[in-house]
Image: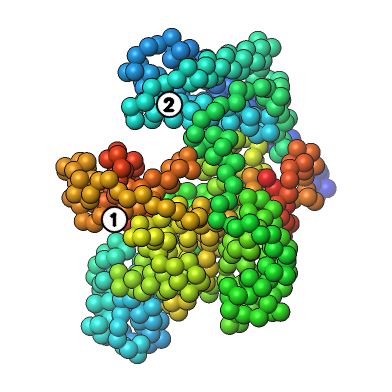
């Protein structure tokens, strides 16, 4: 009997050793294969980045050497498109965003700036000497970035050093040798969504007075129609609109509200919802929900508003409302109102855009009549509605437009015709989804 | 030999049971004209709340209820038959008539809406990074992603921002692939609708877990739960 046990034990041990060896070999080869695949992926991203940057440089120099409007627009749009690819290659590299964020910003701004110039040409303006000077600086900066990348490439980067398994398997990815933190990039003077002036935009709708926490509590209580003594301090926040936070309970439900330190304005208020289904209500119900939200804004002192679109989820409707001044809908001041669908009660409001943009405005009289503006639309669209709207441009500017609601081949659109110049400023596609309306 | 046979038989039996329970088709049930009871009441109440039904919530599935179900089905692209089967029941949030179990929604990749993939990916990130955090903290994490998309310092889409190398630890450890829960999906939608409790933050970190000097040097906006949000 003992012998049998010994035999069984040694056979088992032998089998185990064989199994272990085989699985180790398989595991190791799988690991090598995975490593090779990842290295190939990263190498491709790195080398593609080099190609993209050098191609950007060439296009920018060509712009500088050209003297034809057709060529300008093509090259500018080409640079804009290329920056999107470049950004993608950069984002795919296993290096920390800390070291590449300045390069990402340079690429984004270069594309943004060229898009701005193409738009300028489309409006019938010419490129200035300053524009060409900036284009030249961008081309030079691309050259410097390429040199930096080229140096790394000559050192064998990425190779095994850049993407050793320690690097690509560690949870905290190392910066490696690729570091643009201290690289100097040209400062561009222009007006686009990524320009410094746009990104540093300060709120215009706050007012000037600084409020204390107690005054903020009073403002919160007044907004909600409750006693300030029932509010609890919930800290404060810095950021774009520094604010005081408060929590409390109303009708047995907890809520939180933030009041701006400057001007004591309501930034956002959010109650708790019971949750529920994500379904679209009937048009009649939607109208009731919109009325509820509009009446709420009137009660809270925002005045008349027009609804633009809505989303429905978890038993709630989020109604997008823009204040109306002299029959003009003010999209820059868009306010979101959360309404509980079964009870038709407002459970939240978000006024960030309103506080960033709202101000006393003197609206120009439109030069074009509705009929004149309508002539500027593509003839194939059938228009169902028209109204005047102030729309925010990417550059913080606002433009007075005729907003036409229309449909073409079963697809709904909003088209904006500049009420002064007749230029088609923007087109929005309306998507009717299972969660409400989306504007793209 | 006898000793081996018994567990083996048990194991086989277990497999058989598992296999059967997975594949056995349950009889299809539904609520339709003539049905009655609490479930029908629930259906009527939901239809009434969403504006499809104006009659009494009496638990009797009559012609008015059927019309309401038809209108609901039309609006949501469900096969129009006036019968509350599994699909309609799920959308109405009432107990699935074919399984007898309640459906709380969330979790799955639903619908084919154009922004569904953005909502889902954002919810996956929130689920991985911030589940267990206060709800506001979950929305704030989604807010950071959207603030990055808008910033020139980061790539310009939700997918590019989330999958940027080293940006989010849940991408590295694979938690990003978990199915998001209902709260995470709601947080993603709240953030996409413009609620940003992060105060415009581009970064956040857990002070107990990070030694990263760069991120610790950023100006702090506020703290929510375990996370510090910063510029």
Please tell me whether mark 2 sits on a helix, a strand or a loop: helix
Q: Is residue A432 visible?
A: yes
Say which quarter of the image contains residue A91.
top right
Please state the horizontal and vertical placement of residue A423, each as a whole percent of the image.
29, 38
Instruction: Identify the disc placed on residue A117.
Output: 2
Mark positioned earlier in the residue sequence (1 or 2): 2
What residue is drawn where x is 51% and y is 71%?
Answer: A300
What residue is drawn where x is 40% and y is 11%?
Answer: A66
Q: Which residue is mark 1?
A: A387
Say which quarter of the image contains residue B5.
bottom right
Foreground of the two, A335 or A80: A335
Foreground of the two, A389 or A185: A389
Instruction: Identify the disc placed on residue B14.
Output: none
**Left or right of B204: which side holds B142?**
left
For disc 1, the neighbor class at 10 Å (few under 14, some 14 to 19, many from 20) is: some
**Left or right of B224: which side holds A414?**
left
Please state the horizontal and vertical placement of residue A130, each as a whole percent of the image.
50, 20
* Relative to A313, residue A22 above or below: above
What residue is drawn where x is 25% and y is 82%?
Answer: B64
What residue is drawn where x is 35% and y is 80%?
Answer: B48
Foreground of the two, A216 or A47: A216
């Amino acid at each position: 009997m003992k012998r049998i046990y010994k035999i069984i034990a040694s056979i088992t041990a032998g089998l185990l050793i064989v199994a272990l060896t085989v699985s180790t070999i398989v595991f190791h080869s799988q690991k090598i294969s995975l490593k090779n695949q990842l290295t190939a992926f990263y190498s491709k991203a790195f080398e593609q980045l080099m190609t993209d940057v050098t191609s950007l440089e060439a296009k920018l120099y060509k712009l500088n050497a050209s003297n034809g409007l057709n060529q300008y627009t093509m090259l500018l749009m080409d640079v804009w498109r290329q920056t999107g690819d470049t950004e993608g290659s950069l984002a795919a590299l296993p290096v920390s965003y800390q070291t590449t964020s300045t390069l990402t910003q340079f690429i984004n701004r270069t594309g943004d700036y060229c898009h701005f110039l193409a738009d300028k040409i489309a409006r019938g303006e010419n490129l200035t000497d300053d524009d060409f000077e900036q284009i030249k600086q961008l081309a030079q900066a691309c050259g410097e970035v390429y040199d930096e990348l080229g140096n790394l490439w000559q050192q064998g980067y990425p190779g095994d050093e850049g993407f050793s398994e320690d690097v690509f398997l560690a949870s905290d990815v190392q910066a490696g040798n690729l570091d643009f933190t201290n690289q100097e990039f040209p400062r561009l003077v222009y007006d686009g969504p990524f320009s410094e002036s746009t990104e540093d935009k300060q709120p215009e709708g706050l007012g000037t007075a600084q409020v204390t926490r107690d005054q903020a509590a009073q403002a919160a209580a007044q907004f909600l129609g409750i006693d300030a003594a029932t509010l609890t301090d919930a800290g404060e926040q810095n950021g774009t609109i520094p604010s005081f936070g408060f929590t409390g309970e109303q009708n047995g439900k907890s809520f939180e509200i933030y009041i701006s330190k400057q001007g004591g304005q309501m930034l956002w208020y959010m109650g708790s919802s019971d949750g529920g289904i994500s379904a679209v209500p009937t048009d009649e119900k939607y109208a009731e929900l919109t009325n509820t939200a509009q009446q709420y804004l009137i009660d809270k002192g925002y005045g008349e508003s027009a609804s633009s679109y809505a989303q429905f989820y978890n038993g709630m409707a989020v109604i997008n409302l823009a204040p109306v001044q002299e029959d003009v809908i003010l999209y820059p001041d868009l306010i979101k109102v959360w309404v509980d669908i079964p009870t038709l009660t407002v459970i939240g409001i978000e006024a960030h855009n309103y506080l960033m943009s709202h101000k006393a405005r003197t609206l120009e009289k439109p030069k074009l009549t509705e009929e004149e503006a309508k002539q500027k639309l593509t003839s194939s669209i059938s228009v169902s509605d028209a109204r005047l709207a102030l729309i925010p441009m990417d550059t913080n500017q606002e433009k007075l437009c005729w907003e036409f609601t229309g449909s073409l081949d079963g697809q709904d659109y909003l088209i904006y015709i500049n009420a002064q110049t007749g230029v088609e400023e923007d087109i929005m596609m309306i998507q009717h989804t299972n969660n409400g309306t989306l504007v793209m | 030999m006898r000793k081996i046979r018994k567990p083996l038989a048990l194991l086989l039996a277990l497999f058989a049971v598992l296999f059967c329970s997975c594949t056995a088709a349950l009889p299809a049930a539904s609520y339709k004209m003539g049905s009655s009871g609490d479930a029908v009441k629930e259906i009527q109440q939901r239809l009434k709340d969403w504006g499809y039904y104006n009659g009494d919530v009496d638990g009797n599935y009559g012609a008015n209820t059927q019309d309401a179900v038809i209108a609901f089905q039309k609006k949501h692209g469900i096969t129009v038959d006036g019968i509350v089967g599994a699909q309609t029941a799920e959308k109405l949030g009432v107990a699935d008539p074919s399984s007898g179990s309640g459906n709380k929604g969330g979790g799955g990749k639903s619908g084919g809406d154009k922004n569904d993939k953005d909502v889902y990916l954002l919810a996956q990130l929130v689920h991985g990074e911030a589940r267990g955090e206060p709800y506001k903290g979950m929305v704030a994490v989604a807010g950071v992603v959207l603030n990055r998309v808008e910033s020139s310092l980061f790539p310009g889409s939700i997918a590019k921002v989330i999958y940027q190398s080293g940006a989010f630890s849940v991408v590295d450890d694979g938690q990003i692939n978990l199915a998001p829960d209902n709260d995470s999906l709601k947080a993603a939608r709240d953030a996409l609708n413009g609620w940003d409790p992060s105060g415009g933050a581009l970064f956040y970190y857990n002070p107990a877990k990070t030694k990263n000097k760069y991120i610790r040097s950023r100006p702090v906006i506020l703290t929510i739960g375990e996370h510090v949000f910063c510029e």
